[in-house]
Image (spheres, rainbow, N blue to C red):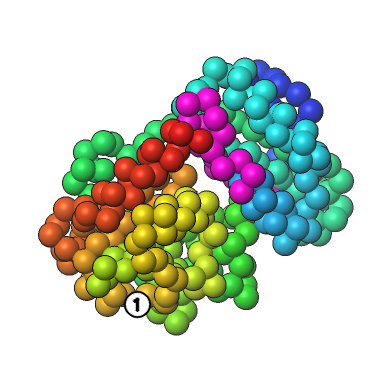
Amino acid sequence: MKIWLNDRLVEEADAKVSVFDHGLLYGDGVFEGIRVYSGRIFEFDAHLDRLYRSAKAIRLEIPMSREKLVEATEKTVAANGISDGYIRLVVTRGVGTLGLNPFVCKNAQLFIIADKIQLYPQELYEKGLRVISASTIRNHPQSLPPQIKSLNYLNNILAKIEAVDANAPEAIMYNLQGYVAEATGDNVFIVAGGVIYTPPVQAGSLEGITRDVVIKLAKAEKLKAAERNLTRFDLYAADEMFLTGTAAEVIGVVNIDGRIIGSGKPGPMTTLLRKKFYEYAHSK
Ligand code: PMP
């Protein structure tokens, strides 16, 4: 596999960053996960916008112009012969001292991995997921804004551990007020009374690119979609529930904390939006 490292493609074995990189020492850096469908990089502009917003929020300068970054990403995808896959684009703070000060790190490191993708098994798309409510509270937006897609995923990882312990593929995270924030690596939607609801990002979620696309697709289908704070009860009582994310796309949830959602199968709006998403992703 060829990896883009800073200014060129290198062999995987040569793609190395220092043990003094603050990305490793402190999770100080930002990243994106992006899909490639039929040789096209999906919603690349939106991903780059989010990457630059995340970097700006942590005062990290991306060491490459946006134009060059597009070119480097395309070259990495081509060099690995990926026509359907996943891109991981990472910018770390770079090598510094053992202190926290990010500004002593002079050379931010940028690397791009383009690989095949491991999806949820097809069976789970047909049957739907069982999820749990995590007791780990999502980062407070005033502590670490969840809109920053940073290299520090420990908050999500603590919730993921709860999911794994409960033998569930995902966990739902709530904020300090008890409102739904997001899943550990996906955004959350429900359908109630014929309306599609998702929490506002201010409740503590990433501004998911798939989330935005799904809201647009729902509106194009003349479905009602709105942002609203959701409680645990709203999930328990929902007619349908689904998650959205770059890797998962649109996947139904049929059980949360032992409560069956709707008929116990992915609901009609979930199924329709999954289909529309598939068509959109493969047509763009
Ligand atoms: N929330 C979190 C915490 C994520 O890591 C992700 C991405 N895997 C998402 C939501 C979904 O965002 P996107 O649709 O942009 O992948």
Which quadrant holds the N terminus? Answer: top right
Q: Is residue 246 magenta?
A: no
Residue 63 figure quarter: top right
Q: Is residue 45 magenta?
A: yes
**Which amino acid type is shown beneath numbered disc 1?**
Thr
- Residue 185: x, y in percent? 45, 53
The residue at which mark 1 appears reads as 231
Specify whether residue 155 is in view: yes
- Magenta span covers which residues? 26-46
- Residue 213: x, y in percent? 48, 51
- Residue 235: x, y in percent? 28, 70
Residue 6 figure quarter: top right
Which residue shows up at 38% across the image and 39% down it?
A: 278
Residue 268 figure quarter: bottom left
**Residue at disc 1, CB closer than 8 Å to ligand 1:** no
With respect to residue 279, does 5 lie above or below? above
Q: Which structural element holds mark 1?
A: loop
Left or right: residue 68 compared with residue 75: right
Which residue shows up at 68% across the image and 56% down it?
A: 54
